[in-house]
Amino acid sequence: VPKGSHKLMKQFDQETLLQPLGNGRYGGQLYPSFNIGSNPNGGYLMALGASALRQLHPNHPDPLSITAHYLRPGVGDAPCEVATSLLRSGKTVSTARATLLQEGKERIEILAAFGDLANTTDVPLHIDAPSIPSPEECIGRSGEAQGVSLGILDRLEIRLNPDEARPGALGKGQISGWVRFRDGRPPDAMAALLFSDALPPAIFGLLGLVGWVPTIELTVHVRRKPAPGWIQAQFKTHDMADSRMIEDGLLWDSQGSLIAQSRQLALLLKKP
Amino acid sequence: VPKGSHKLMKQFDQETLLQPLGNGRYGGQLYPSFNIGSNPNGGYLMALGASALRQLHPNHPDPLSITAHYLRPGVGDAPCEVATSLLRSGKTVSTARATLLQEGKERIEILAAFGDLANTTDVPLHIDAPSIPSPEECIGRSGEAQGVSLGILDRLEIRLNPDEARPGALGKGQISGWVRFRDGRPPDAMAALLFSDALPPAIFGLLGLVGWVPTIELTVHVRRKPAPGWIQAQFKTHDMADSRMIEDGLLWDSQGSLIAQSRQLALLLKKP
């Protein structure tokens, strides 16, 4: 990246920028811009790992399947390093792992398959976007409502379906709405990783504001490149056993095309 | 394992048995018992990796979240080695990765979180088992019908819902039925990994017998220990773009309790 070009880049690109250090290692800075409370958002950490992995093969820039396990919280205003290891590179898929480190400690571990979504044309089976109120009719996500500071709202505009955004509104573990970058950056495959963990936990719609919901593991399958505009999002939790729950996510672009599916295993830690 | 005790073990336990070799490495044999055609089943390969990972922490024997990426087909009648690396061990979750090698080549790569499912009692959200014909009313899966030898049917009894088992029967990408071990071994968390990849691809119900469907990546979340008896299974493919498709799976035990969710990204390779 030539000097001075940072000023031309959009915020998310600047804040996931990594420089090769040799031997599969990449270095950069983890910004507090995507914090939830005092912790960096899990989707942002995944995007940082992906920012290194997409450099491993020139023809495989897109995460087809990416799984992150969250070992320790990230540090939202400190340098980071991503150590990658290319496991196999085929014609259409490269498989690799990555470890995001800060202050000498492993923060997340990633296993992923990368490829090229450029020419997705044949779509024989498709999950349709549900009809929800338009972005203008939805409620802006606000940090104050949850008593935690949401730095991520400086970067993302998030609108929530008013039918679900109130605690217990529909009596089901579902939340939907819209998300886009505040600085006008168009969505892409990398953004899909961030957006897959950007809405409030779906369980809040059922139980209200119940506490901290740390992610154990998040897997995102990016299905195609999105068209410009708002991304429509839907997250559901229909399976909770003990304190462990599954949250399933779907993202569609402004044309109604499915661009990603996600699933995470999270813990529900009750308020003390 | 004391000498001679093999004879008391059930087949699946014998055929996923690994001995510690030191430095996180485990050695054993990959049997052809779970072959689909000439390739070992992907769920069996995952179970072999899990057989090593569950030995890393005495209190964390159960795969809570396990992701396998398939790099090369396994060799169904050759020694195997599993190299593990424990990434972090907490009170309730241990995170680790594993590489299954044969003939010096990496076959699958695994990233997983293990814990203890022994005391799953509080289940506030639950996905109910759909009503399908009983095992006696279902159709036994047969290898001949697909023109490939299904060694896996020597180990597993698989009964398919007759409403879906004929090509195009319901015009949707769904297949359901029942599965159990032929030798009476009760199901457990390890069996859930095998069973998550044991039915014919869900897409066969929509398109008929369309060719080879290699798995790029499979993730299984085991949700609770199953009760003895038949396992009810359901797999759906509602999302296919170009030749890449997502298959979602659900497994329930004989009491109707959800025991696992799975998702895989697979390629649909058309018949030549």
Image (cartoon, coloured by chain):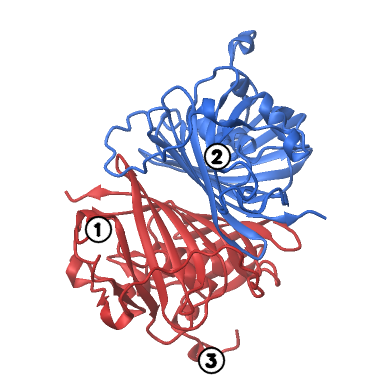
Chain colours: A blue, B red
Image vertical order of residue B112 relative to residue A139, above or below: below
Instruction: Specify whether disc 1 shares its chain with disc 3.
Output: yes
Q: Indicate the chain on which mark 2 is placed.
A: A
Query: Amino acid type of disc 3?
Result: Gly
**Crowd around label 3: few <14 · some 14–19 · many ≥20 (10 Å):** few
Alpha carbons under labels 1 and 3: distance apart? 43 Å
Residue at 60% over, 20% down: A182
Q: Is residue B147 left or right of residue B240?
A: left
Residue B44 seen in render: no
B241 or A158: which is nearer to us? A158
Residue at 70% over, 72% down: B58
Residue position for label 3:
B4
Residue B99 seen in render: yes
| Screen quadrant of the C terminus of chain A | bottom right
**Crowd around label 1: few <14 · some 14–19 · many ≥20 (10 Å):** many
Q: Indicate the chain on which mark 3 is placed.
A: B
Instruction: Specify whether disc 1 shares its chain with disc 2.
Output: no
- x, y (%) of residue B118? 65, 75
Q: Nearer the viewer, mark 1 or mark 3?
A: 1
Q: Nearer the viewer, mark 1 or mark 2?
A: 2
**Quadrant in the picture for residue B90:** bottom right
**Quadrant in the picture for residue A4:** top right
Query: Amino acid type of disc 1?
Result: Phe
As helix, strand or loop, the secondary structure at mark 2 comes to: loop
Residue furthest toward the top?
A: A4
Q: Is residue A38 left or right of residue B105?
A: right
As helix, strand or loop, the secondary structure at mark 1 comes to: helix
Alpha carbons under labels 1 and 2: distance apart? 30 Å
Residue position for label 2:
A196
Residue at 65% over, 73% down: B121
- x, y (%) of residue A66? 51, 43
Residue position for label 1:
B204
